[in-house]
Amino acid sequence: MRKMRNNISSAILSISTKVSDGLSWLVRESKELNPQKAKRGLFHFLKMIMKITAYINNHRHRNMLVGSAILVTLFLISWNTELMPESNEPLIFDENGKFVAAPPAPPSLTFPLGTDLGARSMVNLVLVGVKYTLGAILAITIGRLLLGTILALVTTLFYPSFKRYFTAFFWPFRYIPQLLVGIILMLPVAASPIGYSAKVILEYQLIIMLLIGLPSVFYYMLDMIDEIEKQPYVLSSTLMGGSKFHTLKKHVWPNAKSHLLLLTTQQILSVLQLLTFLGIFSLYLGGPHPTALTDSPRLIYRTITNELAGMAGQNFWLIRRAPWMAYSPILIIAFIAIIVNWMKKGVEDHIAGVIPVKHRPNTSAEQVLNADANLSRNFTIVGVPEQPLAKHDKKKYVSDVIREKLRGTRGYLLRYKVYRLIDVLAIRTAEHISDYPKHAFTALLTVSFVLLAGVFSYAEFFPEENTKKEGKSVEASTEPKETKDLFSYSFTNREHNPVKYKADLTYMDADATLQGTLHVETTNTTGAEQDKIYFHLYPNQFKEPIDGPEWEFVRGPSPTPGWIEIQDIKVNEQKADFKVEGTILEVTMNQWKDMAHSEIDIQFNFQLPSNYSNASYDYAAVWLGNFLPIQAVYDKNGWNLDPYSPFGYPFYSETASYDVTINAPAKYEILSNAEEANATTEIQGENKKYSAKVEGVRDFSIVLLDTQYYQTERFMTQNETLVNVWYRPTTDKQETANRNAMGAGQSIDYFEEFFDSTLPYKELDIIRTVEGNSQMAYQGMIFSAGYNFSDNSFTSLSMTEGVVRQWLSGLVGSQGYKEPWVNESLVSYSLKTYMGEKGYMARTSAEDQIKQQEEIARIQKEGQYLSSPLSDYKNINDYAIMMGIQGYNMYAELDYLVKAGKVNKALKTYVNEYTNKNASGHDLITILEKAGHPQAKGYFDSWLKPEVTE
């Protein structure tokens, strides 16, 4: 204890002396300096430090720079560290002659990592060994990269005939562990002293380690170059006469740079691991070095270079007696591995695009959005037939005010995860209790859960019907409150001039944002003068956390928020006022007369959410659907401003033309629902510019696919429609992707005959997105979930469902929020008709049919009918049963009653008459009446909203 106190006091005294001497020197030098010059110099020094820090922080390979600096610093320290001489003395004394310990000494203040058997500090030994370890690793890594890259380039670009020979030779080494090959080849030379010099042994070992790692580098570069050569722009360059050197310089090298950095870090880790295991097997760099342990004749074998792996191996036998001797080099090896792995993770993030998005709730963008939302909470809709004021004014009671405050408080508290968990638990428990109506027990538990969940759950337990609908939708249409039947109004808008959208976008990969401008050319076809125009901003649905079981399939496992920030709007080159409320953008128009043409310029910034929605991203792709501000539909019932829905197809739009340009990192393959002939791609350094034009579609969809993770399978239909299925070979089955391509192509052939309508576009891209999102079909493009690419025999039926929607959601539009049955029941009927003819459908047992009817009866008893809007459905299960089973049964029974294929004949008429138009339930039933069922109106009345008996 006394020795420790002496050591501590001497250390403190030494440090104090050095600090005092430093301060004295600084004071002395400061007196001689000019104060102004000193301040100026200090200012420039700090400025330089800030610039360097900012440069490193903003550099795309920040981890690589910082990690390399740390390793270089460690190497320089090692380079300037001299090896301590070994001592055979049995005891260790300090400079003052005081006894310290007997070697090997354990860690202490004097020896932080202890000593070895020769009384040498382990700190000195590991610092000396670092330069040999890092030097050997760097030499082997560079040799592997140079040789492997040259072989891959030669065999791919210049001498393809050699490719099969190298491939055949290297093939076994893909499966034999490098360590096993290294041990077998090194044992005869480096296991024990046999007369070879240390230099010869070291050179032999370096060559062996270089060669055994060469196959992995060769195959990596070979696969990457092959993938680059498959790209359309490379093929075009080759066909236009581009030389091999031109391909190497302009196409291969720009795409390979980041991958070479990643490969470098991978090889450093691989070599470090190999060296460590070889050291454990006593195969040291430079061979074993016999050394007398003491004055006795017994010898031990040590690494001659003192490199870290060899030190760990030679001291491993002392792990129980002196563990610090083995753990000291292992500690430095682990530190190097952590630094290199951190560098590797940074390069992977840059390549794969998985850098976490930074969300700052108090940013100016967020404040602007909040201000816009607050200004527009009670905006009025202009441009629709006016109603008496009394019908719209609702008397407000004290309970309404309290409920509004409670809802606001709940919305604030739901930002915290613990409250969201309690809220979901309380609501689910209350729903469960309602199924067991024992009055006293139910009342007691309900009160308990209200107290538990607090004020943020009370408003959800007893919502009024009107309040519930107001919370879900911004209603702008003036449909009658009471109708004589289900078809007294129509959402059809036969006459419209297609809106023209021109977008210029830039995707920022680092923070997953899309910046751009949107130029809109539109005509007032409402039949009256308007002073407002409305646009849908569907991504704003994810600005705040969304809870509830109905959103479960949209949130995903790790959701992050996303929103569209409208920065500026001009109407006819004049600055215009606008308001944003939820997913609706309201723009003020100045006397927008009937049939008048207007041009609107919208500048916006889109922060992509991370979830399972139609516009999101992950490590391998960015998929964008329903992401552009799109003009709302105006029909005989007014502006349709329905919100985003977690299920169904609420996106009510009209056909328009799109001219879109997007700038993105060059690593992405960019595709859209425009045909390839109408799209161009330009490489501009490390960026890519993609331009596309498409007409007569209801929405523009685009995807950015990392070519490292995506491949494609193709199928050509009878009418020469090319089906491209993009999948991830690292996780998906190629056979399934091929089956999906074939299934989609065969479905196109079938439904072109079924609807008597040829698909107007000659390409259909099916994009594999994330694991769990629901499938979304756009004209010419389908977003499909990852589970559709697993080993499942029925995955191709999901492709068939997306193909059906090319007609029933694309060519023919409908009001999917207020009349979902028009589209969804027809999709279900068409899909199951296809399944029946192709032999997919199995007979349903009588017991299963009874259960289905009981479930349908339960759903209808709860006020959910085929004719119900999306806002009336409680969950996706009820919605799927009504649309998928009851909707199909409605048409199947009708087909049985009218016979002679009249239903199919009516569907052909429906598709051909309403192509590029919007249709309503009234239009559909009218066609069915003309096709041979004069009582169709009464028939659909009984199915869409039957009288439910208790």
Image (cartoon, rainbow, N blue to C red):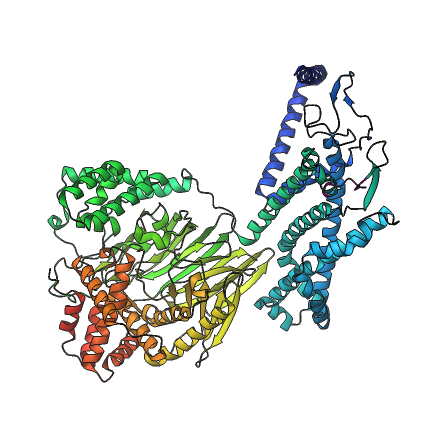
- Relative to 598, is 119 on the left or the right? right
Residue in the picture at 75% in, 28% down: 103
Indicate the position of residue 177 as horizontal and vertical percent values.
67, 57
Q: Nearer the viewer, residue 395 or 585?
A: 395
Taking the magenta stretch, the answer to whether it contains residue 383 is no
Q: Does residue 533 sit above or below 163 in this rendering?
A: above
Which of 402/746 is in front? Answer: 746
Q: Taking 874 as reference, is 315 left or right?
A: right
State the image quarter where residue 910 is shown. bottom left
> Relative to 242, does residue 271 appear above or below in the rendering?
above
Residue at position x 50%, y 73% in the image: 714
- Of all residues, the one furthest to the right in this rendering is 195
Q: Quadrant of residue 57?
A: top right
Figure quadrant of the N terminus: top right
Q: Vertical placement of 446 versus 926: above or below? A: above
| Residue 354 image point, x, y percent | 51, 50
Per the rendered image, the range of residues in magenta is 300-309
Question: Residue 853: x percent and y percent?
Answer: 20, 66
**Residue 778 falls left or right of residue 643:** right
Residue 301 in magenta stretch: yes
Q: Which residue is more in the foreground, 4 or 398?
A: 4
Locate the C terminus by quadrant.
bottom left
Q: Residue furthest bottom?
A: 900
- The picture places residue 213, in percent across and down from the top left corner, at 70, 56
Q: Is residue 16 above or below residue 390?
A: above
Q: Which one is nearer the viewer's eye here, 594 or 653? A: 653
Residue 756 in view in this figure: no
Whether residue 790 is visible, yes or no, is: yes
